[in-house]
Image (spheres, helix red, strand yellow):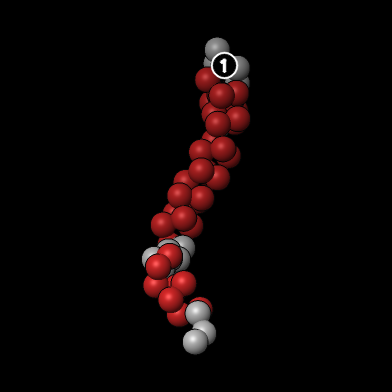
Amino acid sequence: MTWLLAHQGGWDEFLLFAGPIALAVIIMVILERRRPRRTEEPQEESESQNTTP
């Protein structure tokens, strides 16, 4: 296993740097898809409900 992590022209250092960043991006994408969307009401409808006679 140590031969895999020995200096191989820079690709191993790139993986040590990019791996955690890619993992964080993947987790953020998954969490963003699972988050419920907030529906906004049209402005006209919310204004008419707030007025008192």
Taking the image as shown, residue 6 lies to the left or right of residue 26, namely right
Give 43 or 19, whichever is nearer the viewer: 43
Give 39 or 53, whichever is nearer the viewer: 53
Name which residue lies at 45% across and 80% down: 49
Q: Of all residues shown, which one is farthest toward the top?
A: 9
User: In the picture shown, does residue 50 fall above or below 28?
Assistant: below
**SS for tag 1?**
loop
Name which residue lies at 60% across and 30% down: 17
Residue 43 in the image, given as x and y percentages of width and height: 43, 65
Residue 30 in the image, given as x and y percentages of width and height: 44, 54
Q: Give the crowd class for mark 1: few <14, some 14-19, many >=20 residues within 10 Å.
A: few
Residue 2 in the image, given as x and y percentages of width and height: 60, 28
User: In the picture shown, does residue 5 fall above or below 21?
Assistant: above
Can residue 23 be seen by looking at this rendering? Answer: yes
Name which residue lies at 60% across and 17% down: 7
Taking the image as shown, residue 34 lies to the left or right of residue 1, namely left
The quadrant the N terminus occupies is top right
Name which residue lies at 46% across and 55% down: 32
Q: Of all residues shown, which one is farthest toward the bottom?
A: 53
Residue 47 in the image, given as x and y percentages of width and height: 46, 72
User: Disc 1 designates what residue?
Assistant: 10
